[in-house]
Amino acid sequence: MRFFKLFLISVFGLAVVIFLLSLLLPPNAVVERIGVIESPKDTVAAHLTDLRRWKSWYPMFRQDTLFQLQISEPASGVGAWAHWTSKTDVTDTGRLTITGIDDRGMHYHLATRGGQHADGGFEIKSTPDGNGTALHWYVTSHLGYLPWWKFFGFVADRVLGPQMETALNALRADCEHSIVPKQVQPADSAAAPQP
């Protein structure tokens, strides 16, 4: 009985220490990725602000076999949203809502089951030559004050970072393949100077 009581006190003491240590950890985790897309800023902005286009590059929207996706109408602009539900577990849901669009990029809010929330966004600007777009993608996960979520902050970059890199590569390919090459018009023979 004495050892059992000592064991319970030790477990309780360890739980208190872990909880107190977690109070020292920040309640948010930020994951960022940057890249350059060889497409004009307007092309990239169009792909970011229209949620229908996210199907071609955003991981959660690309997994048609795992999730049922519903996108608002209109699918672009502030207030547009996308909601997904797992086909195998109806409690596995999420919702992404566009919260802001300006000439520097767009911002969104992400809510998933269990009350996890994140705010993210894309900051975009033209490259100096004007032919490309520099992109900064950030996601700020609001971890709350529960110790197990706060400790997730330590591995957030390792968990979310590769997914964001894959998504950026897909976005880059999508934007760069959607550029319509400029057509060279044949010279008008009547306007050409005669030798």
Image (cartoon, grey):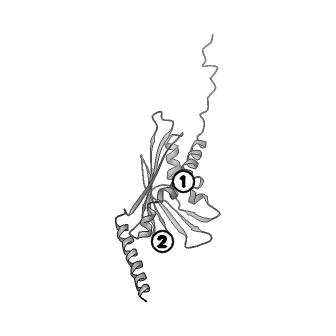
Q: Tell me the quarter of the picture where residue 118 sits.
A: bottom left
Distance from the alpha carbon under mark 1 to that under mark 2 = 23 Å
Q: Residue furthest bottom?
A: 1
Label 2 residue SS:
helix
**Residue at 62% over, 23% down:** 188
Image quadrant occupied by the N terminus: bottom left
**Residue at 63% over, 61% down:** 64
Label 1 residue SS:
helix
Q: Position of residue 100 (x, y in %)?
A: 42, 55
Asked if residue 179 is positioned above or below residue 161 in the image, the reply reads above
Residue to which mark 1 is pinned: 162
Q: 183 or 34, which is in the foreground?
A: 34
Q: 186 or 46, which is in the foreground?
A: 46
Q: Position of residue 19 (x, y in %)?
A: 38, 71
Residue to which mark 2 is pinned: 114
Asked if residue 106 is positioned above or below residue 69 in the image, the reply reads above
Q: Dot 1, how many residues are within 10 Å of its Cα: few (below 14), some (14-19), or many (20+)? A: few
